[in-house]
Image (cartoon, rainbow, N blue to C red):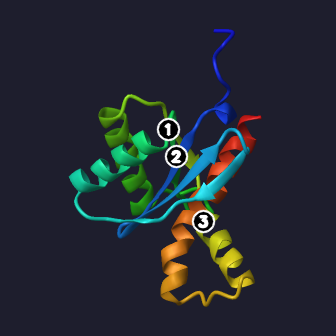
């Protein structure tokens, strides 16, 4: 086991799964940075999994991190249950390690970043980017939590 890579040495994909969009981000072990990808507009489960499969292949992904939202009080919501469904589905579909990580405040933080850059929170651009930025934010938090 001496040559086993640490989590921050792996090429990672994080998924911020919503009902209409999936925000995605990549962890680059060489640069030690998380970068937002384009968002995936949800279609059918089969089509979404096929798109994720292509991303896994194209980027040589070694593990997936799925954001699991809870309320500030730690309670589960419908979105939490949806994340659990996705974790189970990804585990059955792809032969990769699948991790979960609390992403409760990542969307709020992503919106703050967009506002700092002059993006109107109600704009299409904000809707298009917030989920991928959120995925990058909780991916970096996941990495820091492993250290």
Q: Nearer the viewer, residue 118 or 87?
A: 118
- The residue at the point 68 percent across, 70 percent down is 109
The residue carrying pointer 2 sits among few (fewer than 14), some (14 to 19) or many (20 or more) residues within 10 Å by Cα, namely many
- The kind of secondary structure element at disc 1 is loop
Please name which of the two marks, 1 or 3, marks the residue nearer to the observer: 1
Question: Disc 1 designates what residue?
Answer: 61
- On the image, numbered disc 3 is attached to which residue? 133
Dot 3, how many residues are within 10 Å of its Cα: few (below 14), some (14-19), or many (20+)? many
* Residue 113 sits above or below residue 63 on the image: below
Image quadrant for the C terminus?
A: top right
Disc 1: CA contacts within 10 A as few (<14), some (14-19) or many (>=20): some
Q: Is residue 46 left or right of residue 36?
A: left
Quarter occupied by the N terminus:
top right
The answer to whether the residues at label 2 and label 3 have Cβ atoms under 8 Å apart is: no
Cβ–Cβ under 8 Å for marks 2 and 1: yes
Tag shown at residue 46: none
Mark closest to the chain's N terminus, 2 or 3: 2
């Amino acid at each position: 086991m001496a040559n086993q890579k640490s989590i921050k040495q792996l090429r990672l994909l994080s998924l911020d799964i919503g009902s209409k969009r999936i925000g995605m981000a990549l962890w680059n072990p060489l640069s030690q940075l998380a970068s937002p990808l384009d968002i995936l507009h949800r279609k059918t489960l089969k089509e979404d999994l096929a798109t994720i499969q292509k991303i896994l292949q194209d980027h040589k992904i070694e593990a997936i991190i799925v954001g699991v939202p809870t309320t500030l009080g730690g309670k589960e919501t419908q979105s939490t249950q949806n994340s659990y469904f996705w974790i189970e589905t990804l585990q059955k579909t792809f032969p990769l390690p699948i991790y979960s990580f609390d992403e409760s405040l990542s969307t709020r933080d992503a919106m703050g970043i967009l506002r700092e850059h002059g993006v109107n929170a109600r704009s299409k651009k904000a809707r298009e980017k917030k989920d991928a930025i959120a995925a990058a934010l909780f991916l970096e938090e996941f990495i820091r939590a492993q250290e």
